Amino acid sequence: MSTLLEVSGVSVSFDGFKAINNLSFQIGKAELRAIIGPNGAGKTTFMDIVTGKTRPDEGRILWGGKNRSLLAMSEARIAREGIGRKFQKPTVFEDQTVRENLLMALKNDRGPLAVLFYRPSAADLQRVVDLAEEIGLQDHLARKSGELSHGQKQWLEIGMLLAQEPRLLLVDEPAAGMTPEEREHTTALLVEAARTRAVVVVEHDMEFVRRLDCRVTVLHEGSVLAEGSLDHVTANQKVIDVYLGR
Amino acid sequence: MLDAAKDPSSGHGYLDGLGAEPTTGRRGDAPKPLIVRNPSILVFLTALALFTLTVTVLSEAVGPGLISTSFVKTLGKTLCLCLVAIAMDLVWGYCGILSLGHFAFFGLGGYMIGMWLMYERTRDIVATAMAEAPIPPTDAEIVDAIGTQIFGVVGSSEFPLVWAFADSLAIQLALVVLVPGVLALVFGWLAFRSRVTGVYLSILTQAMTLALALYLFQNDSGLRGNNGLSGLQNLPGVAAPQSVVSLWFFWASAAALGLGYLLAAWLVSGKFGSVIRGIRDNEARVRFLGYSVEGYKLFIFAVTAMIAGIAGALYYPQAGIINPAEIAPIASIYLAVWVAIGGRGRLYGAVIGAAFVSLVSSWFTGGQAPDLPLGFYTVKWVDWWLIVLGLSFVLVTLFAPRGIGGLVDLWTERRAPDRHGADLGPDPGALREQEATE
């Protein structure tokens, strides 16, 4: 399997605290991966590093078939390269309609002038309708997204990620605060998305990870503790000690 | 720090022509033209045209003179203030950058046109005076005499470098937009790329404004120090009386305001407007969508600086004089107050705020307002007006964040929003629109 993202030997510390310690991680082109770990294991910092928000002190991050480094790129550039990120708290533009949110995310030229003269094409509008159907918001396109329920906002954000057509999707605790049915829908969305692209889900909730039915990476104190199927890692004594045993 | 006002105009977004088209996946109709989607533009332009017509008909130059020439100038200046308020609303109300420097751009625009006006007028005067001399003066003599006339007050007679193009109207007109634009680009590039935001950015813009004002106060700044430029109300080579000239500037100001309003409405109507409002509400999210936030901020900052420059270039010929005190930070703070009182995030709000507050201000501070005797104390409005203004700013911010423009919502919100049959509440079980109307 060819590698899409390769993180090797990355370390970062904040005021002497090593948030990420010699972390290495790889993910393939169409793969679903769950990252679990106790609080402070470095899950969110890992996402910050990949998306360019935090610069690592050392290490390499190589991207795509051509093995280009992500380290010198801005956040916006990395996003345009095809890495989408979903935050833990649903962050949609509450003052704008679902359709405006999706159109803003739709993969198109991002330059100010191109955006200024942009007119949505019929194909773009159709794509928005399709996306809205996929995330179950087809009846809500004309509504302000601030009026949506918590779960609907989460889906809208996932929809916006899909609209970006990323090659790698980083999703931070997508199921937090969702009802059981909403969780099921979210699982289906992520599994479907991972057919054609890489999806990394950071999650706290073991039950949700079990539903995803994918390879699991366990982080602890900023580095990889174990990797494999959920059954494999939960049987690991070290994992039980740091994660499950307390 | 003030929260960005909720944006009511997004209800007239560029996608309003489209229904919800629920499950069928039908393609949307082509979006309607800007003015149809956004009825407030038509209302505004009509009101502006009627106002211009009324003032013209009642002016001294054309009609019975019910509106004095000096009041025509006041109204023309007010239109320019409305235009710079629109620029402020774009940058603050829509993009979330609380700039305390836009009146500096306004003043720079005034200085640029003022240089040409003063140079040419002085040349007319000097040429007339010297024509009576027995030996006709050479060009060099005339230029020297102009220099002495203009810079005598600051103890110099040499033309500073910045006056190099003062004899060319075309170049000075270009500088009206270029100087504010380039200054905004350089300043914005430095500030935005360092990710300075919020209060810190406001302080930085204020520091820029203060530095510029202090620099211009110096006699060797080349712009006549605290004397500023004067006699700007006279158009060189034009014999028409002030009553006519004032009307010309009034028309030009009205046209500029109308065009500025259209431009601003167009800027915020489409996906561009969507992105800058996104930047206002959640900058990081926009960045992770792949938009270069800094580029957008820089664009809007520079464009609004240029609009402010044009407004200033029309304002100061009507005021007749410009000096560095006009650029002092307090002026930019007033600008923010006007926009806040009028209603941020809606263009007509900015216009209403600037017109209302600046006219009321000049009434109170002009000494026309009668004193208010309280028995134990007499309220002199000249002294107390600023306190009233400050208080109303605080009250509006706390209790009516939508400002005066928010009153329009009281009327439009009485109509039920068109939800295209969607649920009325956030939960799937909520009333459907159909049920609610039964």
Image: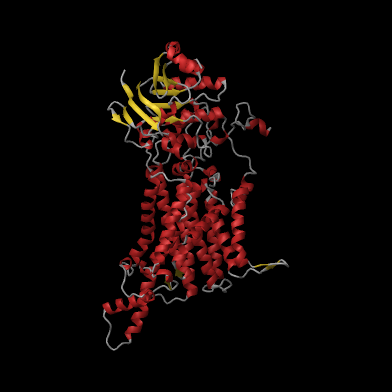
What percent of the width, then of the height, locates residue B41? 52, 52
Q: Which image quadrant: the N terminus of chain A?
A: top left
Residue A144 lies left or right of residue B229; in this view the side is right
Quarter occupied by residue B361: bottom right
Front-lying residue, B203 or B132: B203
- Front-most of A156 and B61? A156
Let me know if residue A211 appears in the view.
no
Residue A217, horizontal then vertical, whole percent: 41, 19
Between B350 and B264, the residue placed more toward the observer is: B350
- Can you see residue A10? yes
Is residue B433 placed above or below B164 in the rendered structure?
above
Q: Residue furthest right?
A: B375
Nearer to the camera, B284 or B429: B284
**For residue A155, side relative to residue B410 (left or right):** left
The answer to whether B421 is drawn above or below residue B318 in the figure is above
Residue at 48% across, 74% down: B242
Place of residue B101 in the rendered image (x, y in percent of width and height, measured from the top left):
45, 56
Q: Determine whether, in the image, residue B400 is placed left or right of residue B115.
A: right
* Residue at the image position 46 percent from the left and 52 percent from the top: B203
Which coloring applies here?
secondary structure
Task: Tally the numbered discs.
Answer: 0
Q: Which residue in the rendered view is the most extreme toward the bottom?
A: B134
Q: Is residue B301 left or right of residue B166?
A: right
Q: Is residue B191 above or below residue B78?
A: above
